Amino acid sequence: MNAFVAKDELPQSVPATNSDVLLRVDNVSLAFGGVKAITDISFDILKGEIRAIIGPNGAGKTSMLNVINGFYHPQEGTITWRGSVRSKMRPYEAASQGIARTFQNVALFKGMTTLDNIMSGRSLKMHRNFFWQLLWRGPAEREEIEHRRKVEDIIDFLEIQAIRKTPVGRLPYGLQKRVELGRALAMEPELLLLDEPMAGMNLEEKEDMSRFILDVNQEFGTTIALIEHDMGVVMDLSDRVVVLDYGRKIADGSPEDVQKSQAVIDAYLGVSH
């Protein structure tokens, strides 16, 4: 953060029209007993952008993602998704409506192959009932062949053909993160939530993952919201950045403006606390 230049005012995001907004967070607060994880947070995510959510450890970033995809239900505030204010939504409902995510810690089926793990992301796209799946004939067979074709396209896109039949538990961490991204892409999400997609990676792995994230955004048109601690990655990838500290929003704007915010500098250097 030593590249930051001090600036007194907090940068704010440019107002967007309703047609541009894919998801809006309005005055959301979340507490666990007496512990406030998020306090009165508001921001939006525009269609087609890469939106970064950053902040020091314990700032409430993952809690915010958990609210967006239904793992947590806030005590106050609303989430508006594609123009509709959401009631309490479970994660599987969020997934069926086009929100996919990855996690800080890899959440894969370690005994299953790369192909089968990514194939599991197609579950919500399969429409044949259990009877047809059990027979695996006719419509069910044709459906699975089509889903496998899409999964193979994702494997080619992520350049992991060589490990398609390898159990993911045998793969190095960087490749496991790539497989997890593939499983999320298999859901064909409109909004992709990435929780520290480059945590624990070396420089080469980070460069590869950055390239894939940009390609997903630009080639597939997928809107992305990501949490990431590597400020170089955030500044290179993001269209806009929202900064949290101790559960409160302290800045929101372009990467260039946010990195000049005195409040952001103080939060990362520990000056303000």
Image: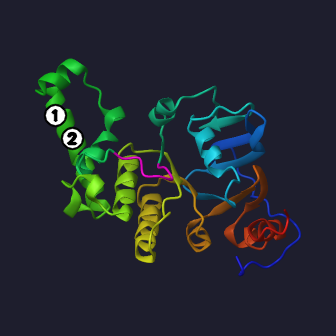
Q: Quadrant of residue 22?
A: top right
User: Residue under circle 1?
Assistant: 142
Which quarter of the rendering shows the C terminus?
A: bottom right
In the drawing, does residue 179 fall left or right of residue 256?
left
In the drawing, does residue 116 fall left or right of residue 21?
left
Mark 2 and 1 residues: CB-CB less than 8 Å, in contact? yes
Residue positioned 64% across, 44% down in the render: 63
Kindly identify which numbered label has been placed on residue 180. Answer: none
Which quarter of the rendering shows the N terminus?
A: bottom right
Q: Is residue 27 visible?
A: no
Label 2 residue SS: helix
- Looking at the image, which is closer to me, 232 or 83? 232
User: Residue under circle 2?
Assistant: 146
Residue positioned 47% across, 39% down in the render: 98
Q: Point out residue 177 in the picture as x, y percentages from the top left corner.
A: 40, 58
Q: Quadrant of residue 230?
A: bottom right
- Looking at the image, which is closer to me, 121 or 270? 270
Q: Amino acid at mark 2?
A: Glu
Residue 228, compared with residue 236, is above or below; it is above
Q: Quadrant of residue 83?
A: top right
Q: Amino acid at mark 1?
A: Arg
Q: Which residues are magenta?
A: 102-108
- Looking at the image, which is closer to me, 188 or 8? 8
Query: Is residue 103 shown in magenta?
Result: yes
Query: Is residue 115 shown in magenta?
Result: no
Label 1 residue SS: helix
Residue positioned 18% across, 28% down in the render: 140
Q: Residues within 10 Å of mark 1 (few under 14, many from 20)?
A: few
